[in-house]
Amino acid sequence: MKKYSPSTIIFIIYLIAIVFLMLYKSVSLTPDRLLIVFLLGVIVLAKSKLKSFVKDWLPFVGLLLGYEILRGLADGFGFKVHSQILIQAEESLFGFLPTIKLQEIFYQPAIVHWYDVFFMLTYFTHFLYPFLIALYLWFNNREFFQKFTSALLLTSFSAFIFFTLFPTMPPWMAGQDKIILPIHKIINETLDKTRLNHSLSTFYQKLNPNPVAAFPSLHSGYVTLSLLTLLAYSPIIGLAFLPLPLAIWFGTVYMGEHYVVDLLGGALLAIICFIIVFKNEGIVRFLKTLMSRRQS
């Protein structure tokens, strides 16, 4: 069994404490904030790795934030917003809409259940999981770190193409537009009932949200890619991580944020990007060169 140094244990405790504090204060775990949290920890506890951290992480986070800017612009090109094709796909697969069925079974508007809060938190922290995995890989295997972050960027920018050319409504929006039966947007309702304020960073406050970027689901794509990478790196760690993707897949459908086909699309995109990057060294070299140029 691998033994961790005292500084590593302190670093882990620091990260856990900061993450729980941010969640308690309803502070969104966005990439820019996570980079600062990680950077402060490296400065204090791993100064010898500081130069390497900046060299590896700034280009990665910079490109990811660049994607976030583009994502907000993806619905401005005038392409038709689709809804019926996803609804028909759901009904073909299940004979009903899983979101409606799950909300009929589990959701009670007058009550805040523990699982409403749990699924809301897992949804809000979808950036946290790949960042923590990237940090773990960066400390333990730089090659895996570079491949994982390359695949994450490839997944993000590939999804942007879908969001631009094939904008789609999430279930809650289709319900609002009376295309399907009304659906509760459980995240917003839970925030209102618990009187929690969802605090975004200044960078994210200035971004235009894109409500029609449902297919493919990057919530599904990110956790699927994270799961595949962990399984490739250490099957034991990968299997231990499995409950989290299951919770996110269930929660996003239950809360009305995604159809099942959105999740399948996100998972398939992640699988393709994982294969491309982890099986093609040329792609890794290209993305590494792209990030190094951005840094310079």
Image (cartoon, helix red, strand yellow):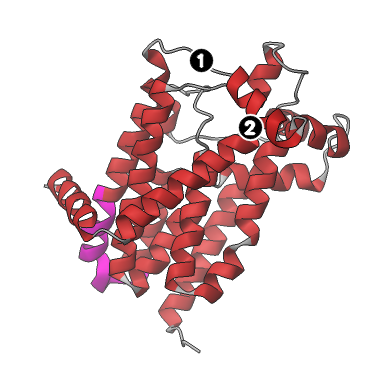
Pointer 2: what residue? 257
Q: Residues within 10 Å of mark 1 (few under 14, many from 20)?
A: some
Q: Is mark 1 on a helix, strand or loop?
A: loop
Report x, y in % for residue 196: 68, 35
User: Which label belongs to residue 26?
Assistant: none
Name the residue: 77% across, 47% down. Answer: 115
Q: Which amino acid does label 1 sit on?
A: Val
Q: Is residue 27 visible?
A: no
Q: In this view, does 117 lie to the left or right of 77?
A: right
Q: Which of 156 and 9 is in front in this view?
A: 156
Report x, y in % for residue 237: 53, 72
Looking at the image, is mark 2 or mark 1 earlier in the sequence? 1
Range of the magenta residues? 45-59
Q: In which quarter of the image is residue 4?
A: bottom left
Is most of the magenta stretch helix, strand or loop? helix
Name the residue: 39% across, 23% down. Answer: 164
Residue 55 drawn in magenta: yes
Pointer 1: what residue? 81
Report x, y in % for residue 276: 32, 53
Q: Is residue 244 left or right of residue 54?
A: right
